[in-house]
């Protein structure tokens, strides 16, 4: 057996250029298959990782998924706000342990600005119930103080004591700026691997303050209130976008949820993060499944290429097979030789594919993190991925049986004297 | 003849390709012994390839017997015949005898990979397989400078000598050469033939040399016209 293996390897090496292309094709298909699977996994994990300990997310009535997307993941925008009094009504319920009001809508160089209260830094949890830590500085205290997420500080190169100008609205360039009200950076948070890293945190009063001299989404012409005078105005928030609620006892969540839904003064919605995420997965499940199916088809195409290449080369190798038979090779040795050749190519394709994926992960994870907030970790192959690879190998073996069988038949009919 | 067993003994052998009406080969009797140097000739289509296939055990006869060193191929399985071929027969073909992706030495050593017996015999003759292969190559006039070249860079004559070394390694009892000189020019034909005969004598191997070039026949001690032992053709020519 060993010498047949060596023969198969040397024979494959001899045709390394044609087989090499097949290896690359299989490698790319494996990279795609694993990449889709890994992206799916990490996205799920990233979303689940982003929020912990929050029992209910409250916002204006919309779909639960949409509320989660904009309130927790900063994806999309809120269509409606809720009034401060509605928020206070819910938050003052004795079953509520803590609540975090959230006000969104402004941005800084594409990073979302979040207005909240200082207890955000105590009560917000993520991952396995970890709380936010400051790598530098402290929570905001003054109206024009800002606390940056780690990515914001890193990407824009900000340091404590620096000044930033916020823009009105979400999105990229060309937004009107709150130019007359610069903020001072007083704190920078430690990395969390969640949307917090990409958020600029300011107080709810600051949100009110920067919009004092604005009307209908634009600065009031010929009218500007400088920073130093804003404290003369009432800065209490009138509206917020959403609120995160933590309860003393989780079992009471349905009671509160019902209360929120039945709130008479305005239409509200309360969603449990876990339930909303489950709904989100159901929505994207179809897309994930079809993506996985497409990648599986690509693998099949790659392996068909392998069969085609080995079969095409077989005719030129009939003399070679006859020589091997003349020195004593059995027809089943010939079968083994050709099948193992296909198997080698598959194995190399898989190894190269996994290596390629590792490289891609290393190069693309910073981009995925900064652009989409998805943390892709350069993990070792997971058990699920291992199963996928085993399936690819199995299909590769099945495919390799085809040239193996063809060579077996040829060597039986050719004997020692192939008629070419 | 010590034990009265011929290297090759054929009796009442009839062979028909599957799906063919008339037999292709019908040999009432043929035998060859250890010291024989047989020159076998015949026109194309006289059944040479078929006979070689039967002697090599890749084809199986339906009637009669074909004994190699006393073992009847017609009573053996395909695997047993493959083993017999590996252990006892060395083949040299017309051309393209070598595996292109193996070195000269590895080509020579191929039979030792498939036959334990020939590996043992080769090791009995040389200290290592490598040394034995080099000994045969030197005997066949192949310079050491050629041993590490890719086989595809050798001339046809050099390739045929590598093939001869491969057929001879591990001292098989039977060497079958199928038109081994037809791709060589006249001078090289003679020198190749002389080397082959000399090495067969040294290894005490029987040589069955198939050719249509009867000018070479004088070097052999038996000269056989295939049409004289294959009755299929006799019947056809009588009709």
Image: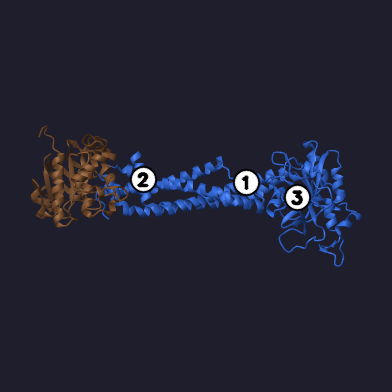
Q: Secondary structure at mark 3?
A: loop
Drawing shade for chain B: brown
What is the chain letter for disc 1?
A: A
**Of A376 and B146, the residue lying toward us:** B146
Assess whether mark 2 and mark 3 are in contact (beta carbons under 8 angstroms). Answer: no
Q: Which mark is residue A8?
A: 2
The blue chain is A
Assess whether mark 2 and mark 1 are in contact (beta carbons under 8 angstroms). Answer: no
What is the chain letter for disc 2?
A: A
Task: Answer with mark 3 or mark 2, whichever residue precedes in sequence.
Answer: 2
Q: Secondary structure at mark 2?
A: helix
Position of B29 with respect to A325 (left or right) is left
Depth check, mark 3 against mark 1: the one in front is 3
Disc 1 packing (10 Å; few <14; some 14–19; many ≥20): some
Disc 2 packing (10 Å; few <14; some 14–19; many ≥20): many
Q: Quadrant of residue A231?
A: bottom right
Kindly indicate whether the residues beneath marks 3 and 1 are on one polypeptide chain: yes
Q: Which mark is residue A160?
A: 3
Position of B156 with respect to A98 (left or right) is left
Q: Label 1, label 2: how many angstroms apart (C-alpha)?
A: 39 Å
Expressed as whole percent of the image width and height from the top left, the position of residue A291 reads: 57, 52
**Of A291 and B123, the residue lying toward us:** B123
Position of A246 with respect to B37 (left or right) is right
Work out whether residue A335 can be spotted: no
The residue sitting at 58% across, 43% down in the picture is: A379
Kindly indicate whether the residues beneath marks 1 and 2 are on one polypeptide chain: yes
The residue sitting at 18% across, 51% down in the picture is: B180
Task: Answer with mark 1 or mark 2, whichever residue precedes in sequence.
Answer: 2
Task: Answer with mark 3 or mark 1, whichever residue precedes in sequence.
Answer: 1
Q: Which mark is residue A42?
A: 1
């Amino acid at each position: 057996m060993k010498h047949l293996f060596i023969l198969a390897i040397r024979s494959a090496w001899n045709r390394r250029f044609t087989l090499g292309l097949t290896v690359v094709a299989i490698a790319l298909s494996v990279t795609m298959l694993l990449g889709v699977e890994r992206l799916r996994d990490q996205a799920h994990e990233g979303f689940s990782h982003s929020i912990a300990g929050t029992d209910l997310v409250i916002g204006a009535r919309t779909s639960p998924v949409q509320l989660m997307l904009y309130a927790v993941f900063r994806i999309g925008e809120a269509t409606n706000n809720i009034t401060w009094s509605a928020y206070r009504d819910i938050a003052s319920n004795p079953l509520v342990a803590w609540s975090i009001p959230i006000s969104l809508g402004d941005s800084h160089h594409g990073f979302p600005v979040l207005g909240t209260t200082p207890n955000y830094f105590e009560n917000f949890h993520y991952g396995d119930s970890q709380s936010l830590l400051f790598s530098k500085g402290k929570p905001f205290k003054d109206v024009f103080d800002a606390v940056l997420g780690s990515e914001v500080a890193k990407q824009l190169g900000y340091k404590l004591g620096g000044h930033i100008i916020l823009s009105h609205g979400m999105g990229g360039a060309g937004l009107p700026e709150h130019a007359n009200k610069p903020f001072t950076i007083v704190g920078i948070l430690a990395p969390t691997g969640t949307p917090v890293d990409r958020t600029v945190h300011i107080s709810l009063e600051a949100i009110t303050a920067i919009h004092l001299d604005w009307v209908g989404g634009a600065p009031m012409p010929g009218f500007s209130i400088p920073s130093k005078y804003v404290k003369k105005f009432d800065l209490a928030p009138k509206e917020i976008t959403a609120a995160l609620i933590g309860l003393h006892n989780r079992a009471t969540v349905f009671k509160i949820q019902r209360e929120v839904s039945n709130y008479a003064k305005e239409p509200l919605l309360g969603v449990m993060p876990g339930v909303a995420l489950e709904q989100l997965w159901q929505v994207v499940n179809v897309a994930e499944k079809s993506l996985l199916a497409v990648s599986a088809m690509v693998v099949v195409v790659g392996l068909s290429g392998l069969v085609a290449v080995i079969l095409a080369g077989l005719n030129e190798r009939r003399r070679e097979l006859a020589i091997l038979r003349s020195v004593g090779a059995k027809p089943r040795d010939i079968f083994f030789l050709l099948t193992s050749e296909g198997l080698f190519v598959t194995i190399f394709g898989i190894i190269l594919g996994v290596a390629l994926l590792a490289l891609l992960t290393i190069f693309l994870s910073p981009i995925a993190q900064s652009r989409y907030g998805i943390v892709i970790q350069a993990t070792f192959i997971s058990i699920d991925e291992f199963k996928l690879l085993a399936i690819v190998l199995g299909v590769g073996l099945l495919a390799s049986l085809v040239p193996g069988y063809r060579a077996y038949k040829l060597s039986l009919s050719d004997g020692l004297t192939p008629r070419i | 003849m010590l034990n009265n067993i011929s290297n090759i003994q054929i009796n009442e052998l009839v062979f028909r390709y599957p799906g063919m009406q008339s037999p292709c080969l019908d040999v009432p009797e043929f035998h060859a012994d250890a010291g024989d140097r047989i020159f076998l000739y015949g026109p194309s289509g006289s059944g040479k390839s078929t006979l070689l296939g039967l002697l090599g055990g890749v084809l199986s006869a339906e009637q009669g017997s074909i004994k190699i060193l006393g073992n009847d191929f017609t009573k053996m399985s395909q695997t047993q015949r493959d083993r017999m071929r590996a252990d006892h027969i060395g083949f040299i073909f017309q051309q393209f005898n070598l595996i292109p992706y193996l070195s000269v030495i590895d080509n020579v050593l191929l039979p030792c990979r498939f036959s334990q017996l020939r590996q043992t015999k080769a090791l009995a003759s040389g200290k290592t397989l490598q040394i034995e292969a080099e000994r045969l190559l030197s005997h066949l006039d192949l310079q050491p400078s050629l041993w590490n070249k890719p086989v595809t860079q050798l001339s046809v004559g050099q390739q045929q000598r590598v093939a001869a070394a491969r057929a001879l390694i591990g001292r098989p009892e039977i060497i079958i050469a199928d038109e081994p000189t037809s791709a060589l020019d006249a001078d090289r034909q003679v020198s190749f033939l002389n080397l082959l005969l000399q090495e067969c004598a040294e290894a005490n191997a029987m040589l069955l040399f198939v050719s249509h070039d009867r000018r070479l026949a004088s070097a052999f001690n038996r000269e056989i016209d295939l049409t004289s032992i294959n009755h299929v053709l006799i019947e056809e020519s009588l009709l």
